Every structure is written in C-alpha cells, then in structure tokens.
Amino acid sequence: MNPILAIMKKEFLQLRRDPRLIGFILFSPLVLMILFGLALKLEPDHLRMAYVDQDQSMFSELIKTNIWNDGYFELYEVADPQAIIDHIRDGKARAGLLIPNDFSAKLMDNLQPTVQMYVDGTMPSLATAMDNKKHAINDASVSSDMYFLDPDDTSTIIAPEPFLLDVQLLFNPEKRETWFFLPGVIGVLIMQISLILTATAIVREKENNTLEQILVTPIRKWQFIFGKILPYIMIAFADFYLILAIGWLMFDLPIPASQGMLFMLASVYVCGLIAMGLVISTLSQTQQQAIFLSIFILIPSILLSGFIFPIEAMPNYIQPIAYLLPFTYFVEIIRGILIKNNDFMVLLPNFAALSAFAILFITISIIRFKKTLPTS
Amino acid sequence: MPNAIEIDQLKKSFGNFQAIGGLHLSIAHGEIFGLLGPNAAGKSTLLRMLCGILSPDSGKIKLLDMDLSKHGEKMKQHIGYVAQSFALYPELTVAENLHFYAGLYGIDDQAHLQSLLETFELVAIQKQRAGNLSGGYKRRLSIACALVHNPQIIFLDEPTAGIDPFTRKELWQQFYQLSNAGKTLVVTTHYMEEAERCHQLAFLHHGKIVAQGAPEVIIASLQHYAIFQITTSGHPAWIDALKKLPQLILLNPFGHQLRIITEQDIHAEDIQNFLRPHSNETIAIQRVEPTMEDAFMTLTREAATP
C-alpha cells in the first residue's frame, strides 16, 4: 500500500474508534450552521426606543406612526429627555426619540424643526444601521404630509425637507470602531485561554498516566482541583489586565471610574470559565476532544452573545440561547463599565447571571469530578 | 507480628469480566512478593485495589493491620506505587519531578531527596527533562518518586519491563536493600528470572491464585512431570508428530530449543522411539531440571484446561 494511503487509512480508523470526536466533527458543524443561519442578521428589528413627545401634535404622531410601521423600533414613552439617555445607558432601550415642543410650530413656519434621535453607540451594527434608517424615518411618505406650500405659488416647496433628523451616537460619539469591539474582544481572548487551558490540563494528566500516580498520594480531590486551577485563574487574570492595558495604551479605550467593578467582573467571569473548562475536562477522554468541546462553546459565544450581531436581530426562539451563554452577560457588563459608565446597580442583574453561571459550573465540576476520578 | 498485607475473599469484576475472583493472600513484612501470571490475569487490577485507587466489589484488604476501606487516606502515607507506565512529567526535570511528588506528601527533607537521587544514580542527570531520559532512567526516577515518603509497602507494577539486563540487576539490588530495611515489596512481572528473585510468589490466572510459595517450591511443583529438551533448527516434520505423543503435557519451542513437558513415567528413549517413524536421524533428547518458565507454562496450561 502507498505509505500516504496507509497513514490516511490509519487516521480514519483512529477517528472511527473515537465516537465522541466523530460526534463533534459531524454534529457541531451541523448544529452551528443551522443555528447561525437562523440567528445571524446585522439589521436588528423590534429594537426598544424610548421617546418623549413634547409636541403632542398630529405631526409628531405622524413621525411616531411612521417609525412603528417600519418595524425597526418598538416605541415606548418615558417621562423626560434625560430618561431617554438613562434608559439607553441602562440597556432598557437601544435608541431614543425626542420630538421638541416647538416642532409643529416651527414646521408650520417652515423653520425646519429638528427631531433628536439617540442611538446606543456601544452596539456596532446599530450605529451603522442607523445611517441607513435615518431616511426611513423622514422619507417621502411622511415628509409629503408635512410640506407647507406657499399659498401664492403652490409649485414651490419652501423648505426642501420639512424637518431634520439629528442622530446622536451616545457613549461613542466619535463612532470609534475599537470601542465597539475591543471590550468584547477582551472577553473572547480570556475565554479562549481559560477554557482551553483548563479543559486540556486534567485530560493531559489522564493521557500521561500521572493522574493515577497522584491519586495514590494523600492529596485530597479538592486540593488537586484547586492546585490545578489556581495557576490558570492567575494566568487568566494577568491576561485580562494585560489585554486591557493594551486597549488603554494603544486603542484609547476609556479607563473606567470603578476599578472595583472591573476586578469583580474579571473574578466572576474567570472563575466561571475555569469551572466550565473543568466540566469539559471531565467529559473528555483526550485533549483533542477537550479542544473540540471548548470551540463548540467558544464560537456560539462570539456569534450569539450580542458581541457582533445584536441579540434583538435574532428570531425570538433563538434569543434564549444567547442568554444561556455567560459571554452575553460579560459583553453587557464590560460595555457598561468601560463605555457607558454604568452604575453597579444597573449591571447587577448581569453580574448576578454571570455569578450564577460560575456557581453552576463549579458545582457541576465538583459532582463530575467525584464520578470521574477513582476512589480515594 | 501480623502480616504486612492480608487479603481475604477479594472480588472485582468489570461488567461481565471477572478480573479478581475471591482472592486470599498473606504477605509478610520485609518480603519481596512476586505476582506472576499471563496478561489479563488480574495482576494490575489487584495492585490498584491494594493501592486504594480501585474499589473492590467485595472482600477485605488489610495493610499494616489496618482495614484499607476504613483507613484508605491514612494508608496512603505508608504505601508507594510505581505504575506500569512512567507516571512522570516529561516537561519537568528529574529533580523537579522528585520534588513535585515530595510536595504531594508534604515532604521537604532535602537530604532524603538528595540520597534518593544518589541511590538511583540520578545526580548527574537531575537537571535533564524527564521526557528526554532513556527507559532505564525513567524507571529509576519513577521508583525514586514512589519512595519520597519512605513508605512501608511498595507496589511495583512490572518495574523492569523494557529495561536492559544490567539496569534490571541494579534495580533488583535496590529492591533487596529496601527489603532488608524492612520494607514490603509487591512486584508484578512477566520475567521468569525476575520471578525467581522474589522471596515468595503467587501465580495468578483469571483472577485466581493457582500456585503460591517460594520460587523453588513453585518449580518443585513440577516434580510430577518430566522435562525434556531437544536442540533443533528450523521446524522439522517430526514436531507435528511429537504433538501426538500420548504423555505430552506441553510443547514449548524456545529459540533453537524445544522444551517438552510430559507425564512422569516416560524416558527420553520412549520419545525417540515414538519419533523414529517420522525422522531418519536420531534425535538427541535430554532430560533436564524444571525451570520457572516450565512452571509458568505448565501452570498457565493447567489453569486454562477445564
């Protein structure tokens, strides 16, 4: 037999004898392809938009109706203009609309009033999409009802556009792309390092037959697990701040007012990831399997967490998957801390979710380890 | 003084496969006890149960007069285990591996660790990575690592497999020294000459002891048989005929030699006469003393025959 064929045959035979790996190879691309095909859209719809209509006129209603009909935003009313910004900062709304009280008066005087729109500048796709959406809001269908013609010369439109739409990008007024992505990138890099390092670390002990030798010694299981994971927690922490420092020094990422929150985020996130890595290591027999499983978590985390593609753009039945990914909460928190300057109380639900994940994975890893490791 | 190891009615199965079936065994202090048997006889399974890393289905193990099931954690301070595979960290140096295992036992006695490096001739290579060592040195290091806490009982799973005869001899000298120092050693092996070096042997087959005693006693158990040796080359036609010899128990080709184990009441001439119709030349047949290999082959055969 040709030596290349001999090696090929051996590789296929080895793969065939590793049913878990076959499962990953066949199952994971299938699931991910279908999932991403259904989920990923850059243009969101049904985004929550907080509005204040100070004009309360037929014309302001016309604008709101037009926005409703477009399907892009779901309007809800808030008390005052500051509330619009607060709601966007707190993540309750992704956009805001302020129709000033002199809107119809100016319109009637052909003074081209301005409608103020606010957009969450931490959402990359939303900021770019708004440039296109601007036209949909003051397009011909709405504008035509607002033209006031010169009674002496009906052929002349006095103002070319009856009103102006001013879009203000909140929290990232300069529309810096690095601000869109870098906070999330920090999380992706930490996830990659923590998951793969931990997931393979214990499998490597199994593969090297050192696990059995260690279990003969008086070491307790918890001592073994802690001894194993603490170095990776330290490495992940060091990486977290190293990556952040690069973001601050090279890419002008804002330095947050609260370093405490940042430390808390790093703690909860890293502990959760390390515990998740441990769970993977108990489910894997080989390092190859462990890496595949880690990637199976890593890719959906990047694509379904709202880091690149808005969760609001995903079909309703897929959105719960996004909320099953710890990274989703990380992205919300880190954008909140670095870009939006959120208060702790605003981020608390996300912190709670991330902590719950950490506790869940730590618990599963302990239970799984009791089953996986021989008696001691 | 009670025995170092007492095993009573020990059983272990993996699914339908019975690895150890109702084993009873006593091993005295300071003894080098050999567990001999073919592959899948249950040697490693027994060793792993004795180390407390595998739970028996039933039965009792007492180490140093303490019930292993009740005092497993405490016992770990008193036992050392050298696994069949080299349980070393290839990225760590010789000294780092040794210090790592010492750390697991909370031992910081530098003089003791240095003496282990010296005993196993690892001083000169202590800064080399374990992954780059030869098989012999990996084995020396594995044994040294198992001795960091000065255990009373040492379990060695095929400790000299794949090792050159010179190193094997040296390691056995170390085993004797440990035994002289009062340590109890339990050694699994395939090597007959290694089995002969043990003070006591148990011959395992399908998880049961089929023979037990000092090596000379095991060999003497062949006194009911006659052993013959024929020096030959190639595969002469009469070998097939020899297989039909009515008194034949076992035919064991070994290089240019044939070992024939037969019932006691037969002489070399009887075999020559039996083979005469099948061979033109006279075949030189010599009655010889039984060896450990003869015992191993015969006991395996007897145990396998229902």
Image: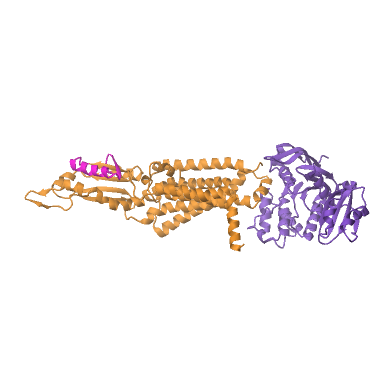
Colouring:
by chain
Can you tell which quarter of the image residue A181 is in? bottom left
Instruction: Give the quarter of the image for residue B70.
Output: top right
Q: Residue at x 15, y 50 (%)?
A: A111
Residue B106 percent across, percent down from the top left: 67, 48
Instruction: Tell me the residue at 88%/49% (across/down).
Output: B262
A20 and A347: which is toward the camera? A20
Magenta residue check for A330: no
Q: Which percent across, then down, holds residue A293?
A: 52, 49
In the picture, measured across the screen, residue A47 lies left or right of residue A155, that is right
Q: Which chain is orange?
A: A
Which chain is represented by purple in the image?
Answer: B
Q: Is residue A257 visible?
A: no
Count how many numbered circles sit on residues in the image. Answer: 0
Q: Quadrant of the N terminus of chain A?
A: bottom right
Residue A70 falls within the magenta-colored stretch: yes
- Answer with left or right where residue A107 lies relative to residue B44: left
The residue lying toward the viewer, choosing from A251 and A28, is: A28
Q: Nearer the viewer, residue A203 or A216?
A: A203
A125 lies left or right of A217: left
Q: Nearer the viewer, residue A238 or A31?
A: A31
In this rendering, would A298 be left or right of B277? left
Q: Find the residue positioned furthest to the left.
A: A152
Quadrant of the drawing holding the C terminus of chain A:
top right
Residue stretch in magenta: A54-81
Query: Does the rendering let one see residue A117?
Result: yes
Residue A18, given in percent of the width and then of the height, sits at 58, 50
**Image height check: is B140 above or below B34?**
below
Residue A341 image offset from top left, x and y in percent = 37, 48
